[in-house]
Image (cartoon, rainbow, N blue to C red):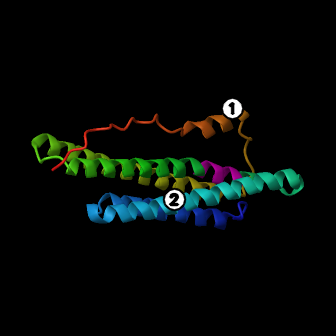
Amino acid sequence: MDLDNPAHLRVVAVRLGDRARAVAAAASAPAGYLQGRLGDETSNLADLLADLTYAVTWQLDEAVRRPRLHTPELRRGTAAAARAAIPVALALAGLGQAVAQLGALHTLDAYEPTEEQQAAVHRTRHGLEQTLRDASAQLAAAAQHMNHDADHVDDPPRRPPTPSEIAAHATAGTLPPAVPTPCGPNPAR
C-alpha cells in the first residue's frame, strides 16, 4: 500500500465503504443467511485490519531504516491508515458482539414460546440489528475520513499536531467494557 499516494488511500476508502454497506445489508438479512454473512464480513474486516496493520508497521520500520525517504506526505498517509484501524477494529468487535447475539437467539429458541421468551427474542434481534448498524456506521465514518485524508495527503500541514493531540486521537476510540455473558439453564424442549 503506497501510503503517500492519494489514489491508494482512496482505494482503502472504497474498501471501507464496501464493508460498511455489506454490514448494513447483513442487518436486514433473514436469520438463515445472517450466519454466513457475518462469517464473510468478519473475515473481510480482519483482512482489512491486517492490511492496515501491515502497511503502518512496514512504514514505521522503513522510517527507522531510511529516515530521509520518509516524507511528510508519507507520514500523513501512514497516520491516516493508522487512524482507520480504530473504527475497523471497533466494527470487528461489533461483529463479535453480533455473533454473541446470534448465540443468544439460538439459546432462546430452545425455550418454550411464552410472552417472556418472545419479548427476549424481539429484544435480542433488535439489539443484533442495532449492533450491525453501529458497526456499519463506524466503517462509513472511516471511509469518509480516509477520503478526506486522501484529499489532503499532499497538503503541507498548517501546523503539526502536538504530541498530546496525536495521543488523544489514538486512545479516543477505545473498546467499551466487556459485557458479561450469562450462563443460563440448558433448557430441553
Taken as a whole, is the magenta stretch helix, strand or loop?
helix
Quadrant for residue 178, please give it. Answer: top left
| Residue 21 at least partly seen | no
Q: Which residue is mark 2?
A: 45
Coordinates of residue 61 in the picture (x, y in percent) = 80, 53
Q: Helix, strand, or loop for circle 1?
A: helix
Q: Name the outermost residue toward the left.
A: 114
- Residue 83 is one of the magenta-drawn residues: yes
Name the mark nearer the viewer: 2 or 1.
2
For label 2, the crowd category at 10 Å Cα-Cα, with few meaning under 14, some 14 to 19 and many 20 or more, is many
Q: Residues within 10 Å of mark 1 (few under 14, many from 20)?
A: few
**Residue 52 seen in this snapshot:** yes
Identify the magenta region: 78-84
The kind of secondary structure element at disc 2 is helix
Give the alpha-carbon distance from disc 2 to disc 1, as whole Å: 29 Å
Left/right placement of residue 99 relative to residue 4 reads left
Quadrant where the N terminus sits is: bottom right
Tell which of 144 and 112 is nearer to you.
112
> The residue under label 1 is which amino acid type?
Ser
Circle number at residue 164: 1
Residue 139 has which mark? Answer: none
Residue 71 placement (x, y as % from top left): 81, 55
Q: Position of residue 30 (x, y in %)?
A: 26, 63
Quadrant of the rendered structure where residue 68 is? bottom right
